[in-house]
Amino acid sequence: MIVPIKLERAHTVQYNITIEKLPQLKFDTSVAIVTNPTVANFHLDILRARITAPSVNVITVPDGEAYKTLQTIEDILDHCFIHKLDRKSVLIALGGGVIGDMTGFAASLYQRGIDFIQIPTTLLSQVDASVGGKTGVNNQYGKNLIGSFYQPKAVYIDPSFLETLPSREFAAGVAEVIKMAIMFDKDFFFYLQHADFSNLQVVKEMIRKSVELKAWVVNQDEKEAGIRAVLNYGHTFGHVVENETDYTRYLHGEAVAIGMVMANTLAVALNLLSKKEADTIKALLKRAALPTEYTIQDIEKFYEHFYLDKKSSGGKITFILPNGIGRYKIATDIDEKIVKKALSAFGEKR
């Protein structure tokens, strides 16, 4: 199955997202695969067997969100120079969202930009991170605050790679699927309520639907000037949770799940979402084995961190909230007291 991406606002960019068994890939130039030891152990030999190229190099970086830094980007670029890659060379991201984000960012920088291909190996990266061209790294101020919009040449999603995925990583990907349904497709949300996440055909359907929704959004708004910002539902809160816990306690999708519950609490306070709908969403997150609880130690500090969110500007914080299930609201004028009262529901219990 192929889902096309076509961007024509500032320039014409077209590429395909292929959802099927990884095909043979033929290149007439040098290729460098960027991966980490965990993914390489499971999938590197499979990928190398499917590549035909004058030379194939492997760049291995440490595993984990903690290594999604400018230092790792510099290490990747150093390897590109050591392997004598030129402007026609191709980088291939083999891994989850961290690998995909860093590979794309490095590709956008090397010799002012070379092609890269996404081969995502986690559910989260297959349904979200690999699609749409967001690249970047974290720093001490927050998540993905340094980066670029840089589209891949192609995306190959092979669902069989998920067979080696730990259950916790799989659940983190389901969080992004649920996010997409809540924002854009009520019927898809109802489907997920009764879906058997252990069934391969169900998983393929989840990937297909999520990728189609993401492609539909990106085709309208490549650089997050409008509707694409809606994909950050749960992320404004979730990124603060990740930052407060030094990117070590929660996987990204787990933090997004917590962030959705927080966003829903605010939406209920604003009468955008009913308490019943919020409880229904929380129940689905729990059924997917995702965390839904978090204790905020300092509400003032948590609130101040929102100002570092990329969607906020002019001193105004932007919140992406559900307006019922299947619809959304982008809000920039919510009273600080209302937000802090919603956050107080997650404060320390006395």
Image (cartoon, rainbow, N blue to C red):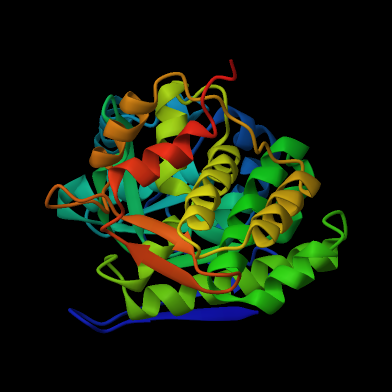
From the viewer's perspective, is 74 left or right of 57? left
Query: What residue appears at the point 47 percent right and 41 percent down from the top-left corner?
Result: 342
Query: Residue 311: horizontal and vertical position, in percent?
Result: 27, 54
Figure quadrant of the N terminus: bottom right
Figure quadrant of the C terminus: top right
Q: Name the residue nearer the viewer: 246 or 61.
A: 246
Q: Quadrant of residue 212?
A: bottom right
From the viewer's perspective, is 130 left or right of 90? right
* Number of on-image labels: 0
Query: Residue 270: horizontal and vertical position, in percent?
Result: 45, 59
From the viewer's perspective, is 22 left or right of 70? right
- The residue lying furthest to the top in this view is 350
Query: What residue appears at the point 62 percent right and 42 percent down from the top-left corner?
Result: 44
- The residue lying furthest to the left in this view is 314
Q: Name the residue nearer the viewer: 275 or 148.
A: 275
Q: Quadrant of residue 153?
A: bottom left
Query: Relative to 293, does residue 136 appear above or below in the rendering?
Result: below
Evaluate whether residue 28 shows in this view.
no
Evaluate whether residue 286 shows in this view.
yes
Query: Relative to 171, does residue 29 appear above or below in the rendering?
Result: below
Q: Name the residue nearer the viewer: 24 or 304.
A: 304
Query: Relative to 174, does residue 209 appear above or below in the rendering?
Result: below
From the viewer's perspective, is 160 left or right of 253? right
Query: Residue 7: horizontal and vertical position, in percent?
Result: 31, 80
Query: What residue appears at the point 49 percent right and 46 percent down from the top-left corner?
Result: 97
Query: What residue appears at the point 17 percent right and 52 percent down from the top-left corner?
Result: 313
Query: Residue 265: horizontal and vertical position, in percent?
Result: 54, 48
